[in-house]
Amino acid sequence: MNISNKVLGRLTRYRALLTEYFPKEKTHIFSHELAAMMGLSASQIRRDLMCLGYYGVPRYGYEISELVKYINEILDASKLHHVAIVGAGNLGRALMTFLESRRATLKIVAAFDEDPSKSNRMINGVPCHSMDAAEEILRREDIRIAILCVPGSEAQRVTDRLVRAGVKGIMNFAPVPIRIPVGVALEEIDVTSALERVAFFTNNRANAPKERRHADR
Amino acid sequence: MNISNKVLGRLTRYRALLTEYFPKEKTHIFSHELAAMMGLSASQIRRDLMCLGYYGVPRYGYEISELVKYINEILDASKLHHVAIVGAGNLGRALMTFLESRRATLKIVAAFDEDPSKSNRMINGVPCHSMDAAEEILRREDIRIAILCVPGSEAQRVTDRLVRAGVKGIMNFAPVPIRIPVGVALEEIDVTSALERVAFFTNNRANAPKERRHADR
DNA sequence: TAGATTGTTAATCGATTAACAATC
DNA sequence: TAGATTGTTAATCGATTAACAATC
Protein backbone atom coordinates (compact mmCIF):
# COMPACT_ATOMS: atom_id res chain seq x y z
CA MET A 1 0.00 0.00 0.00
CA ASN A 2 1.21 3.48 -0.81
CA ILE A 3 1.20 5.87 2.08
CA SER A 4 0.21 9.42 1.19
CA ASN A 5 2.08 12.51 2.31
CA LYS A 6 -0.92 13.59 4.36
CA VAL A 7 -1.24 10.33 6.25
CA LEU A 8 2.50 10.34 6.79
CA GLY A 9 2.37 13.83 8.27
CA ARG A 10 -0.33 12.80 10.70
CA LEU A 11 1.54 9.65 11.73
CA THR A 12 4.57 11.73 12.66
CA ARG A 13 2.35 13.94 14.78
CA TYR A 14 0.58 11.06 16.48
CA ARG A 15 3.96 9.73 17.46
CA ALA A 16 5.21 13.06 18.75
CA LEU A 17 2.08 13.52 20.81
CA LEU A 18 2.16 10.02 22.26
CA THR A 19 5.86 9.95 23.06
CA GLU A 20 6.43 13.51 24.22
CA TYR A 21 3.19 14.99 25.47
CA PHE A 22 1.17 12.15 26.85
CA PRO A 23 0.89 11.03 30.49
CA LYS A 24 3.30 8.14 30.99
CA GLU A 25 0.90 6.23 33.23
CA LYS A 26 -1.64 5.74 30.43
CA THR A 27 -0.87 2.59 28.48
CA HIS A 28 -3.83 2.55 26.07
CA ILE A 29 -5.70 5.09 23.99
CA PHE A 30 -8.99 5.09 22.04
CA SER A 31 -9.28 6.48 18.55
CA HIS A 32 -11.68 9.13 19.81
CA GLU A 33 -9.21 10.24 22.48
CA LEU A 34 -6.38 10.67 20.01
CA ALA A 35 -8.84 12.37 17.68
CA ALA A 36 -9.80 14.91 20.34
CA MET A 37 -6.18 15.70 21.06
CA MET A 38 -5.30 16.04 17.40
CA GLY A 39 -8.44 17.91 16.44
CA LEU A 40 -9.41 15.22 13.94
CA SER A 41 -12.26 12.73 13.60
CA ALA A 42 -12.03 9.27 15.14
CA SER A 43 -12.75 7.83 11.69
CA GLN A 44 -9.69 9.48 10.29
CA ILE A 45 -7.48 8.20 13.08
CA ARG A 46 -8.64 4.64 12.55
CA ARG A 47 -8.22 4.93 8.82
CA ASP A 48 -4.68 6.30 9.20
CA LEU A 49 -3.73 3.47 11.55
CA MET A 50 -4.87 0.89 9.00
CA CYS A 51 -1.61 1.29 7.09
CA LEU A 52 0.50 0.32 10.10
CA GLY A 53 -0.30 -3.37 10.20
CA TYR A 54 -0.96 -2.96 13.91
CA TYR A 55 -4.42 -3.63 15.28
CA GLY A 56 -6.20 -2.29 18.30
CA VAL A 57 -8.66 -4.21 20.40
CA PRO A 58 -12.33 -3.21 20.53
CA ARG A 59 -13.21 -1.80 23.95
CA TYR A 60 -9.53 -1.59 24.97
CA GLY A 61 -8.23 0.68 22.25
CA TYR A 62 -4.62 0.83 21.09
CA GLU A 63 -1.61 -0.01 23.21
CA ILE A 64 0.48 3.12 23.04
CA SER A 65 3.92 1.51 23.16
CA GLU A 66 2.98 -0.88 20.35
CA LEU A 67 1.42 1.90 18.30
CA VAL A 68 4.60 3.93 18.56
CA LYS A 69 6.69 0.91 17.66
CA TYR A 70 4.72 0.34 14.47
CA ILE A 71 4.86 4.02 13.52
CA ASN A 72 8.62 3.93 14.05
CA GLU A 73 8.81 0.99 11.73
CA ILE A 74 6.92 2.74 8.95
CA LEU A 75 8.96 5.91 9.36
CA ASP A 76 12.12 3.82 9.37
CA ALA A 77 13.11 5.66 12.48
CA SER A 78 16.23 3.68 13.14
CA LYS A 79 17.93 5.02 10.05
CA LEU A 80 20.29 7.89 10.79
CA HIS A 81 20.10 10.81 8.38
CA HIS A 82 22.74 13.49 8.06
CA VAL A 83 21.19 16.89 7.45
CA ALA A 84 22.70 20.18 6.29
CA ILE A 85 21.41 23.69 6.87
CA VAL A 86 22.07 25.83 3.83
CA GLY A 87 22.06 29.53 4.67
CA ALA A 88 23.12 30.38 8.22
CA GLY A 89 21.08 33.56 8.58
CA ASN A 90 18.67 34.10 11.45
CA LEU A 91 16.29 31.38 10.37
CA GLY A 92 18.98 28.84 9.61
CA ARG A 93 20.67 29.40 12.95
CA ALA A 94 17.36 29.19 14.82
CA LEU A 95 16.60 25.88 13.13
CA MET A 96 19.97 24.47 14.19
CA THR A 97 19.01 25.02 17.80
CA PHE A 98 15.38 24.11 17.38
CA LEU A 99 16.09 20.82 15.65
CA GLU A 100 19.10 20.01 17.82
CA SER A 101 18.39 16.63 19.31
CA ARG A 102 14.66 16.80 18.63
CA ARG A 103 15.02 13.61 16.63
CA ALA A 104 17.95 11.35 17.27
CA THR A 105 17.80 10.00 13.73
CA LEU A 106 17.92 13.44 12.10
CA LYS A 107 21.30 14.92 12.83
CA ILE A 108 22.47 18.31 11.60
CA VAL A 109 26.10 17.78 10.72
CA ALA A 110 26.94 20.85 8.64
CA ALA A 111 25.85 24.34 7.67
CA PHE A 112 26.81 26.43 4.66
CA ASP A 113 26.82 30.16 4.05
CA GLU A 114 28.20 32.48 1.42
CA ASP A 115 29.14 35.08 4.01
CA PRO A 116 32.83 34.47 4.85
CA SER A 117 32.33 35.76 8.39
CA LYS A 118 30.04 32.80 9.06
CA SER A 119 32.14 30.05 7.60
CA ASN A 120 34.95 27.91 8.95
CA ARG A 121 33.70 28.02 12.49
CA MET A 122 31.14 26.42 14.75
CA ILE A 123 27.69 28.03 14.99
CA ASN A 124 25.32 26.67 17.61
CA GLY A 125 27.40 23.53 17.74
CA VAL A 126 27.29 22.94 13.99
CA PRO A 127 30.39 23.32 11.78
CA CYS A 128 29.69 26.05 9.25
CA HIS A 129 31.47 26.05 5.90
CA SER A 130 31.67 28.30 2.88
CA MET A 131 29.33 27.50 0.02
CA ASP A 132 32.36 26.69 -2.13
CA ALA A 133 32.99 23.65 0.03
CA ALA A 134 29.40 22.41 -0.20
CA GLU A 135 29.80 19.71 -2.85
CA GLU A 136 32.83 18.18 -1.22
CA ILE A 137 31.43 18.16 2.31
CA LEU A 138 27.96 16.96 1.28
CA ARG A 139 29.57 13.92 -0.28
CA ARG A 140 32.15 13.36 2.41
CA GLU A 141 29.56 13.52 5.21
CA ASP A 142 27.00 11.56 3.18
CA ILE A 143 24.37 14.29 3.54
CA ARG A 144 21.19 13.53 1.64
CA ILE A 145 18.82 16.04 3.29
CA ALA A 146 19.14 19.82 3.15
CA ILE A 147 17.22 22.59 4.85
CA LEU A 148 17.22 25.58 2.56
CA CYS A 149 17.22 28.96 4.31
CA VAL A 150 18.75 31.18 1.65
CA PRO A 151 17.12 34.32 0.20
CA GLY A 152 14.49 33.72 -2.47
CA SER A 153 16.75 35.09 -5.17
CA GLU A 154 19.32 32.35 -4.48
CA ALA A 155 16.98 29.45 -3.86
CA GLN A 156 16.85 27.81 -7.28
CA ARG A 157 20.54 28.20 -8.01
CA VAL A 158 21.51 26.70 -4.64
CA THR A 159 18.96 23.92 -5.04
CA ASP A 160 20.48 22.88 -8.34
CA ARG A 161 23.90 22.67 -6.71
CA LEU A 162 22.59 20.61 -3.82
CA VAL A 163 20.86 18.18 -6.12
CA ARG A 164 23.96 17.80 -8.25
CA ALA A 165 25.87 17.00 -5.08
CA GLY A 166 23.54 14.11 -4.32
CA VAL A 167 20.94 15.63 -1.98
CA LYS A 168 17.71 13.60 -2.14
CA GLY A 169 15.41 15.60 0.13
CA ILE A 170 14.95 19.34 0.59
CA MET A 171 12.95 21.37 3.07
CA ASN A 172 12.58 24.80 1.50
CA PHE A 173 12.06 27.85 3.72
CA ALA A 174 12.86 30.32 0.96
CA PRO A 175 9.72 32.24 -0.02
CA VAL A 176 9.76 31.05 -3.63
CA PRO A 177 8.90 27.66 -5.10
CA ILE A 178 11.87 25.61 -6.22
CA ARG A 179 11.95 22.97 -8.93
CA ILE A 180 13.63 19.65 -8.42
CA PRO A 181 14.16 16.58 -10.57
CA VAL A 182 12.29 13.30 -10.18
CA GLY A 183 13.54 11.30 -7.23
CA VAL A 184 14.13 14.24 -4.92
CA ALA A 185 11.66 14.85 -2.09
CA LEU A 186 10.48 18.39 -1.35
CA GLU A 187 8.64 20.10 1.46
CA GLU A 188 8.01 23.81 1.20
CA ILE A 189 7.37 25.92 4.25
CA ASP A 190 6.42 29.43 3.30
CA VAL A 191 6.10 31.30 6.57
CA THR A 192 5.06 34.57 5.00
CA SER A 193 2.33 32.87 2.99
CA ALA A 194 1.06 31.11 6.11
CA LEU A 195 0.91 34.39 8.00
CA GLU A 196 -0.95 36.02 5.12
CA ARG A 197 -3.49 33.21 5.20
CA VAL A 198 -4.06 33.68 8.90
CA ALA A 199 -4.46 37.42 8.36
CA PHE A 200 -7.00 36.79 5.60
CA PHE A 201 -9.20 34.63 7.78
CA THR A 202 -8.80 37.06 10.62
CA ASN A 203 -10.47 39.62 8.36
CA ASN A 204 -13.08 37.17 7.18
CA ARG A 205 -14.11 35.47 10.35
CA ALA A 206 -16.99 33.56 8.87
CA ASN A 207 -14.90 31.01 7.01
CA ALA A 208 -11.91 29.98 9.05
CA PRO A 209 -9.34 27.69 7.39
CA LYS A 210 -9.60 24.75 9.70
CA GLU A 211 -12.54 23.42 11.58
CA ARG A 212 -10.57 21.95 14.41
CA ARG A 213 -12.74 22.94 17.29
CA HIS A 214 -13.11 22.11 20.92
CA ALA A 215 -16.29 20.19 20.23
CA ASP A 216 -15.98 16.44 19.70
CA ARG A 217 -17.00 14.75 16.55
CA MET B 1 -17.79 32.58 -3.87
CA ASN B 2 -15.92 31.00 -1.00
CA ILE B 3 -12.21 30.90 -1.43
CA SER B 4 -10.50 27.79 -0.09
CA ASN B 5 -7.40 27.84 2.08
CA LYS B 6 -5.46 26.09 -0.65
CA VAL B 7 -6.36 28.57 -3.36
CA LEU B 8 -5.61 31.38 -0.94
CA GLY B 9 -2.17 29.96 -0.23
CA ARG B 10 -1.36 29.80 -3.91
CA LEU B 11 -2.61 33.34 -4.53
CA THR B 12 -0.22 34.66 -1.88
CA ARG B 13 2.61 32.84 -3.58
CA TYR B 14 1.70 34.02 -7.07
CA ARG B 15 1.80 37.55 -5.73
CA ALA B 16 5.14 37.09 -3.99
CA LEU B 17 6.66 35.61 -7.12
CA LEU B 18 5.32 38.32 -9.42
CA THR B 19 6.19 41.27 -7.20
CA GLU B 20 9.51 40.14 -5.77
CA TYR B 21 11.11 37.64 -8.08
CA PHE B 22 9.98 38.52 -11.56
CA PRO B 23 11.84 40.63 -14.15
CA LYS B 24 10.41 44.15 -13.98
CA GLU B 25 10.52 44.59 -17.75
CA LYS B 26 7.94 41.86 -18.36
CA THR B 27 4.43 43.29 -18.24
CA HIS B 28 2.41 40.19 -19.14
CA ILE B 29 2.47 36.51 -18.25
CA PHE B 30 0.77 33.40 -19.60
CA SER B 31 -0.84 30.82 -17.36
CA HIS B 32 1.67 28.23 -18.52
CA GLU B 33 4.59 30.51 -17.64
CA LEU B 34 3.35 31.08 -14.12
CA ALA B 35 2.61 27.37 -13.91
CA ALA B 36 6.18 26.46 -14.82
CA MET B 37 7.58 28.84 -12.23
CA MET B 38 5.24 27.58 -9.52
CA GLY B 39 5.55 23.93 -10.44
CA LEU B 40 1.81 23.64 -11.07
CA SER B 41 -0.40 22.96 -14.08
CA ALA B 42 -1.64 25.78 -16.29
CA SER B 43 -5.18 24.56 -15.67
CA GLN B 44 -4.79 25.08 -11.99
CA ILE B 45 -3.44 28.59 -12.41
CA ARG B 46 -6.38 29.57 -14.61
CA ARG B 47 -8.85 28.04 -12.22
CA ASP B 48 -7.31 29.83 -9.25
CA LEU B 49 -7.46 33.16 -11.07
CA MET B 50 -11.17 32.70 -11.74
CA CYS B 51 -11.97 33.83 -8.21
CA LEU B 52 -10.27 37.20 -8.68
CA GLY B 53 -12.80 38.81 -11.00
CA TYR B 54 -9.90 39.79 -13.23
CA TYR B 55 -9.67 38.41 -16.74
CA GLY B 56 -6.72 37.81 -18.99
CA VAL B 57 -6.76 38.16 -22.73
CA PRO B 58 -6.31 35.13 -25.00
CA ARG B 59 -2.96 35.28 -26.76
CA TYR B 60 -1.74 38.15 -24.54
CA GLY B 61 -2.03 36.51 -21.15
CA TYR B 62 -2.44 38.36 -17.88
CA GLU B 63 -1.22 41.89 -17.20
CA ILE B 64 0.99 41.46 -14.16
CA SER B 65 0.28 44.79 -12.48
CA GLU B 66 -3.47 44.22 -12.77
CA LEU B 67 -3.19 40.65 -11.57
CA VAL B 68 -1.31 41.79 -8.48
CA LYS B 69 -3.84 44.56 -7.88
CA TYR B 70 -6.71 42.08 -7.89
CA ILE B 71 -4.87 39.63 -5.62
CA ASN B 72 -4.19 42.51 -3.22
CA GLU B 73 -7.88 43.27 -3.22
CA ILE B 74 -8.85 39.70 -2.32
CA LEU B 75 -6.20 39.49 0.38
CA ASP B 76 -7.33 42.86 1.72
CA ALA B 77 -3.71 43.89 1.63
CA SER B 78 -4.33 47.49 2.63
CA LYS B 79 -5.46 46.50 6.09
CA LEU B 80 -2.75 46.78 8.73
CA HIS B 81 -2.50 43.89 11.18
CA HIS B 82 -0.66 44.03 14.47
CA VAL B 83 1.11 40.77 15.20
CA ALA B 84 2.66 39.40 18.40
CA ILE B 85 5.38 36.79 18.76
CA VAL B 86 4.71 34.63 21.78
CA GLY B 87 7.84 32.90 23.01
CA ALA B 88 11.09 34.75 22.30
CA GLY B 89 13.36 31.72 22.09
CA ASN B 90 15.55 31.02 19.09
CA LEU B 91 12.70 30.46 16.71
CA GLY B 92 10.66 33.43 17.90
CA ARG B 93 13.61 35.77 17.62
CA ALA B 94 14.49 34.46 14.16
CA LEU B 95 10.94 35.07 12.98
CA MET B 96 11.04 38.66 14.22
CA THR B 97 13.94 39.33 11.90
CA PHE B 98 12.68 37.15 9.09
CA LEU B 99 9.24 38.74 9.00
CA GLU B 100 10.52 42.25 9.68
CA SER B 101 9.22 44.38 6.84
CA ARG B 102 8.50 41.40 4.61
CA ARG B 103 4.89 42.54 4.46
CA ALA B 104 4.09 46.16 5.19
CA THR B 105 0.58 45.21 6.34
CA LEU B 106 1.78 42.60 8.84
CA LYS B 107 3.65 44.40 11.58
CA ILE B 108 5.20 42.72 14.60
CA VAL B 109 4.54 45.10 17.44
CA ALA B 110 5.22 43.00 20.53
CA ALA B 111 6.81 39.82 21.83
CA PHE B 112 6.17 37.92 25.04
CA ASP B 113 8.28 35.52 27.06
CA GLU B 114 8.13 33.96 30.48
CA ASP B 115 11.87 34.29 30.98
CA PRO B 116 12.38 37.56 32.94
CA SER B 117 15.77 38.07 31.31
CA LYS B 118 14.04 38.50 27.97
CA SER B 119 11.28 40.85 28.99
CA ASN B 120 11.05 44.60 29.34
CA ARG B 121 13.56 45.28 26.63
CA MET B 122 13.87 45.48 22.86
CA ILE B 123 14.80 42.30 21.00
CA ASN B 124 15.55 42.62 17.30
CA GLY B 125 13.67 45.90 17.31
CA VAL B 126 10.55 44.46 18.93
CA PRO B 127 9.51 45.37 22.49
CA CYS B 128 9.50 42.19 24.56
CA HIS B 129 7.23 41.88 27.58
CA SER B 130 6.63 39.38 30.34
CA MET B 131 3.79 36.91 29.78
CA ASP B 132 1.98 38.50 32.71
CA ALA B 133 1.51 41.63 30.67
CA ALA B 134 0.14 39.78 27.64
CA GLU B 135 -3.57 40.39 28.08
CA GLU B 136 -3.16 44.08 28.72
CA ILE B 137 -0.76 44.72 25.85
CA LEU B 138 -2.65 42.57 23.35
CA ARG B 139 -5.71 44.70 23.96
CA ARG B 140 -3.90 48.00 24.16
CA GLU B 141 -2.04 47.40 20.89
CA ASP B 142 -5.08 45.85 19.21
CA ILE B 143 -3.19 42.66 18.38
CA ARG B 144 -5.39 40.04 16.71
CA ILE B 145 -2.69 37.76 15.30
CA ALA B 146 -0.18 35.75 17.32
CA ILE B 147 2.76 33.63 16.29
CA LEU B 148 3.16 30.88 18.83
CA CYS B 149 6.75 29.74 19.45
CA VAL B 150 6.50 28.32 22.95
CA PRO B 151 7.44 24.76 23.95
CA GLY B 152 4.87 22.10 23.18
CA SER B 153 4.08 21.65 26.84
CA GLU B 154 2.94 25.26 27.10
CA ALA B 155 1.16 25.59 23.77
CA GLN B 156 -2.44 24.89 24.74
CA ARG B 157 -2.35 26.88 27.95
CA VAL B 158 -0.87 29.92 26.22
CA THR B 159 -3.31 29.58 23.32
CA ASP B 160 -6.25 29.72 25.68
CA ARG B 161 -4.90 32.93 27.20
CA LEU B 162 -4.35 34.51 23.80
CA VAL B 163 -7.84 33.66 22.65
CA ARG B 164 -9.34 35.05 25.83
CA ALA B 165 -7.42 38.25 25.20
CA GLY B 166 -9.07 38.65 21.81
CA VAL B 167 -6.59 37.04 19.40
CA LYS B 168 -8.40 35.93 16.22
CA GLY B 169 -5.61 34.23 14.29
CA ILE B 170 -2.75 32.00 15.40
CA MET B 171 0.24 30.59 13.58
CA ASN B 172 1.43 27.66 15.68
CA PHE B 173 5.07 26.57 15.54
CA ALA B 174 4.85 24.46 18.67
CA PRO B 175 5.17 20.77 17.79
CA VAL B 176 1.75 19.85 19.15
CA PRO B 177 -1.72 20.52 17.77
CA ILE B 178 -3.66 23.21 19.58
CA ARG B 179 -7.42 23.55 19.87
CA ILE B 180 -9.17 26.84 19.32
CA PRO B 181 -12.78 27.97 19.44
CA VAL B 182 -14.91 28.72 16.39
CA GLY B 183 -14.06 32.06 14.86
CA VAL B 184 -10.31 31.83 15.39
CA ALA B 185 -8.08 31.07 12.40
CA LEU B 186 -5.24 28.60 12.76
CA GLU B 187 -2.21 27.62 10.74
CA GLU B 188 0.10 24.97 12.09
CA ILE B 189 3.70 24.70 10.98
CA ASP B 190 5.33 21.62 12.40
CA VAL B 191 8.94 21.82 11.29
CA THR B 192 9.95 18.52 12.85
CA SER B 193 7.09 16.71 11.15
CA ALA B 194 8.01 18.26 7.81
CA LEU B 195 11.60 17.14 8.20
CA GLU B 196 10.47 13.64 9.10
CA ARG B 197 8.36 13.52 5.95
CA VAL B 198 11.31 14.55 3.82
CA ALA B 199 13.44 11.89 5.50
CA PHE B 200 10.78 9.26 4.83
CA PHE B 201 10.66 9.97 1.11
CA THR B 202 14.43 10.14 1.01
CA ASN B 203 14.39 6.53 2.17
CA ASN B 204 11.64 5.60 -0.21
CA ARG B 205 12.67 7.31 -3.38
CA ALA B 206 10.04 5.78 -5.59
CA ASN B 207 7.12 7.80 -4.29
CA ALA B 208 8.15 11.37 -3.62
CA PRO B 209 5.60 13.66 -1.96
CA LYS B 210 5.23 16.24 -4.69
CA GLU B 211 5.39 15.80 -8.38
CA ARG B 212 6.63 19.29 -9.07
CA ARG B 213 9.21 18.54 -11.68
CA HIS B 214 11.22 20.38 -14.22
CA ALA B 215 9.14 18.94 -17.02
CA ASP B 216 6.20 21.03 -18.25
CA ARG B 217 2.67 19.85 -18.15
C1' DT C 1 -24.92 -10.66 28.06
C1' DA C 2 -24.97 -5.60 26.69
C1' DG C 3 -22.46 -1.91 25.27
C1' DA C 4 -18.50 0.28 23.43
C1' DT C 5 -14.99 0.29 20.13
C1' DT C 6 -12.58 -1.50 16.26
C1' DG C 7 -11.52 -2.30 11.06
C1' DT C 8 -13.29 -1.60 6.73
C1' DT C 9 -16.39 -0.46 3.08
C1' DA C 10 -19.29 2.72 0.70
C1' DA C 11 -20.74 7.47 0.33
C1' DT C 12 -19.51 12.06 0.27
C1' DC C 13 -16.87 15.87 -0.32
C1' DG C 14 -13.35 18.75 -2.32
C1' DA C 15 -9.49 19.59 -5.32
C1' DT C 16 -7.12 18.88 -9.65
C1' DT C 17 -6.98 17.95 -14.46
C1' DA C 18 -8.59 17.48 -19.13
C1' DA C 19 -11.11 19.15 -22.71
C1' DC C 20 -12.84 22.52 -25.66
C1' DA C 21 -15.63 26.45 -27.33
C1' DA C 22 -14.79 31.33 -27.33
C1' DT C 23 -11.66 34.81 -28.38
C1' DC C 24 -8.00 37.68 -29.68
C1' DT D 1 -7.20 34.04 -41.48
C1' DA D 2 -4.66 30.56 -38.45
C1' DG D 3 -2.90 29.56 -34.20
C1' DA D 4 -2.40 30.23 -29.38
C1' DT D 5 -4.46 31.14 -25.12
C1' DT D 6 -8.28 32.04 -22.17
C1' DG D 7 -12.49 30.86 -19.06
C1' DT D 8 -15.28 27.32 -17.77
C1' DT D 9 -17.44 22.87 -17.59
C1' DA D 10 -17.22 17.99 -16.97
C1' DA D 11 -14.36 14.15 -15.66
C1' DT D 12 -11.14 12.36 -12.67
C1' DC D 13 -8.71 11.76 -8.73
C1' DG D 14 -7.87 11.64 -3.81
C1' DA D 15 -9.11 12.44 0.92
C1' DT D 16 -12.50 12.49 4.58
C1' DT D 17 -16.60 10.94 6.79
C1' DA D 18 -20.43 7.96 7.85
C1' DA D 19 -22.08 3.63 8.64
C1' DC D 20 -22.05 -0.80 10.45
C1' DA D 21 -20.82 -5.72 11.09
C1' DA D 22 -17.38 -7.91 13.89
C1' DT D 23 -15.45 -8.20 18.28
C1' DC D 24 -14.07 -7.93 22.92
Image (cartoon, coloured by chain):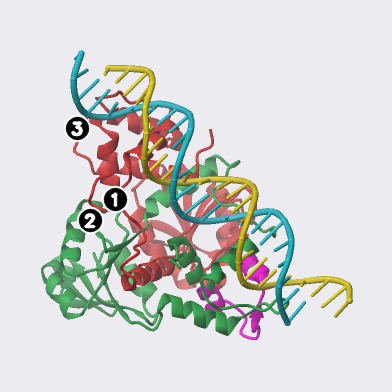
Chain colours: A red, B green, C cyan, D yellow
Q: Residue at x 39, y 71 (%)?
A: A196
Image coordinates of residue B212 in percent, x first then y, are 60, 56
Under circle 3, the secondary element is: loop
Q: Residues within 10 Å of mark 1 (few under 14, many from 20)?
A: many
Q: Are marks 3 and 1 in contact (CB under 8 Å)?
A: no
Q: Are marks 1 and 2 in contact (CB under 8 Å)?
A: yes
Residue B176 disc label: 1
Image coordinates of residue A92 in percent, x first then y, are 42, 63
**Disc 2: which residue:** B155
Q: Out of A70 and A119, give the one closest to the viewer.
A: A70
Between the residue at mark 3 and the residue at mark 1, the CA separation in whole angstroms equals 18 Å
Q: Residues within 10 Å of mark 3 (few under 14, many from 20)?
A: few
Under circle 1, the secondary element is: loop
Q: Out of A169 and D17, give the one closest to the viewer.
A: D17
Q: Residue at x 19, y 65 (%)?
A: B162
Identify residue type, mark 2: Ala
